[in-house]
Image (spheres, rainbow, N blue to C red):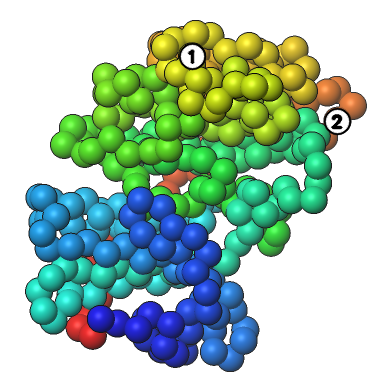
Amino acid sequence: MMNIQAPGAIWEGWVVTEQLGRDHLGPVYRAMAMDGTQRSTVKHIALEANTPDFDACRERLSEAIGTMMQLSGTPGFVPVEDSRFDFREDGTGVDVFIRTPGLPGLTEYLSGMGQPDQPRVLAIGIDIARAIDTLQQMDMVHRNLKPAAIFWDEGSHSFRLGNLWNVCSLKDEAVAVTGTPNFMPPEVYNRQAVTSRTMDLYALGTVLYRLMNGNRVPFLSYGMQPEQALAIRMNGTPVPAPSDADPRLAAVLQKCLAPSPADRYQTGAELAKALNACYPATGVNIDPQPPVKPEESVKPHGFRNFRTTRK
């Protein structure tokens, strides 16, 4: 078994310093260049050979990383610095490593600020809605959009969408349901669909709603358990207006969280335009630009394109 924290274990000149967290696919680590000039984040996904449909899962993960590579030069997305597949010598599976810049996540960015003001929340929403629109143009869906998937890039003064290892084609009907229940739309949570064209917009709406509602999900009030609030929303009850949003923004967020997909914004561009219209006349107006398409010369990387090494 590889000692991930040994100097140079994954990439020459790099050392893993600590584990930052984990999700259903595996842990996330902090990594530093050994000369101290660069800080990055490393995602480790261990795909076991006894996983049902191992080959299909491996290919799907390869395609997801290919999409990440394709989007690396596109505004609104966290770029990939490097990636690799390691086939285990004993044949028990594959270890996948993805290195991205060590950008602060949304929670870290907002820490110490107290209640974020509405213009800041609008800026988050517009940047991520544009990124979602780019995915939609590719017939792709993120599937696990939540605060942990949103990052702040000080260099470009913009918010970026990351953690794209769950991304898949909207046409892939064999994919398993993936996501975080509090940010799932009802049709996915209730297993009426495995993906939905508006599911990322619903998830973004939930992120913004919480920021404008005292960090509380819809229906969560004093004395109520989070599971109760989630059940009310998943049963199709329209959400109330968030407590700290003005009426115009409240209406936008309520439309994002409409129980029926047909009643939501259908594209990220539509949502970005609606959020932009919520800026006060005296505030800072961010004029929505057309979503930037990935460079057509950059093709998705298949499994065979990745470096394969044995440890």
The answer to whether residue 271 is seen in the rendering is no
**Residue 86 seen:** yes
**231 to 43, vertically: above or below:** above
Tell me: residue 115, above or below residue 65.
above
Nearest the camera: 133 or 104?
104
Q: Is residue 131 above or below residue 157?
A: above
Q: Amino acid at mark 1?
A: Ile
Q: Is residue 190 above or below residue 53?
A: above
What percent of the width, then of the height, locates residue 23?
41, 53
User: Which residue is disc 1 drawn over?
Assistant: 232
User: The residue tagged with tag 2: helix, strand or loop?
Assistant: loop
The percent coordinates of residue 298 (x first, y second) are: 34, 58
Mark 1 or mark 2, which has the lower sequence index?
1
* Image side of residue 117 versus residue 104, left or right: right
In which quadrant of the rendered view does residue 275 lie? top right
Query: Which residue is drawn at the image coordinates 54% and 32% (left, top)?
Result: 204
Task: Work out whether residue 142 or residue 267 is closer to the camera in this orientation and state it.
Answer: 142
- Find the distance from the CA under tag 1 to the CA under tag 2: 36 Å
The residue under the point 54% across, 27% down is 226
Q: Find residue 65 and name its label.
A: none
Q: Position of residue 108 (x, y in %)?
A: 67, 54
Q: Nearer the viewer, mark 1 or mark 2?
A: 1
Neighbours of disc 2 within 10 Å: few (<14), some (14-19), many (20+) = few
Q: Which residue is mark 2?
A: 283
Q: Residue at x 38, y 80 (%)?
A: 4
